[in-house]
Image (cartoon, rainbow, N blue to C red):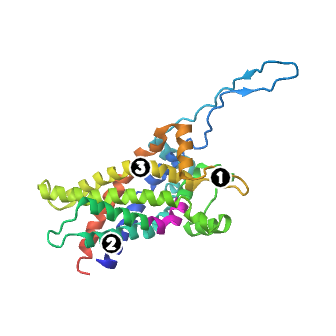
Amino acid sequence: MGVKGFVEGGIASIVAGCSTHPLDLIKVRMQLQGENHAPPVQSLRQPAVTFQTTTSTVHAPPPPRPPRVGPVTVGVRIFQQEGVAALFSGVSATVLRQTLYSTTRMGLYEILKQKWTDPETRNIPLARKIAAGLIAGGIGAAVGNPADVAMVRMQADGRLPPAQRRNYKSVVDAITRMAKQEGVTSLWRGSSLTVNRAMLVTASQLASYDQIKETILEKGVMRDGLGTHVTASFAAGFVAAVASNPVDVIKTRVMNMKVEPGAAPPYKGALDCAMKTVQAEGPMALYKGFIPTISRQGPFTVVLFVTLEQVRKLLKDF
């Protein structure tokens, strides 16, 4: 397999990433909804004046909570306010991310899977598939984190007021400016979350695809063809979305936060971001953007594996 596995996985990932980019953009915008909403002020106590023995309490009305909108509304607003091209904001970062992250994880997964396959039965236990996915996903995420940060920022830029937008021209411009203005370490901001998410996604996505596909073929439900590939890949996409969405929300917010010089960052880290998000918006905030996540993860996984199977057929003699 060697290099071939990396090439096959890379081609399939880039095709899948570009074709589902608008859905990923909508998911990011939804995950950032309500982020700047401060918890309502319950009361304001006034200091006692001279000779006054009691204090008075002035109740301030809580500010209205911004309404949450669905993926269709978010998509229509982006189209109306920013134009159709905005649906592909950050697509250059998606290409770089898939080239670095997905090529690495797909290639490593195939190498580990081959090494751990029983030579006699040609089978590999589910536990080993999951372990291969965890290792491959973690390494791939560490390699691709700079492109991931750039992608999140470029996708989120349009929701900011014009004066606050970063206006990155491309993924190269984004990475260069981040390194100059915020330091090289900013390129790995949220890397622990990226690695954790990637491990969950890769293990659940690749392992479940292989397992479901094998089960379908063993039970004789369908033959090895497009129908089997689509069924197994959509199921794998659903599993991956459920497993990764909470980590994905926190990752998006940590990567997108603005750190002003001399000021404390909005979040001290992943755990702080998770706690503030749950306190301000409730525990279900960790599943914000789940509909566009599954709407994107499903088609992405289908395109990924269907393309992968076709690329494997084309390159089988190489």
On the picture, is 290 further left or further right than 222?
A: right
Look at mark 3 in the image and give the residue it sits on.
293
On the picture, is 242 further left or further right than 231?
A: right
Q: Quadrant of residue 57?
A: top right
Q: Is residue 268 visible?
A: yes
Look at mark 2 in the image and give the residue it sits on.
8
Of mark 2 and mark 3, the one earlier in the sequence is 2
Q: Amino acid at mark 2?
A: Glu
Q: Amino acid at mark 3?
A: Thr
Residue 64 x, y percent position in the rendering: 61, 31
Quarter of the figure that contains the N terminus: bottom left
Which segment did they paint magenta?
A: 140-151
Of mark 1 and mark 3, the one earlier in the sequence is 1
Label 2 crowding class (10 Å Cα cut-off): few <14, some 14-19, many 20+? Answer: many
Q: Nearer the viewer, residue 314 or 117?
A: 117
Q: Main secondary structure of the magenta part?
A: helix
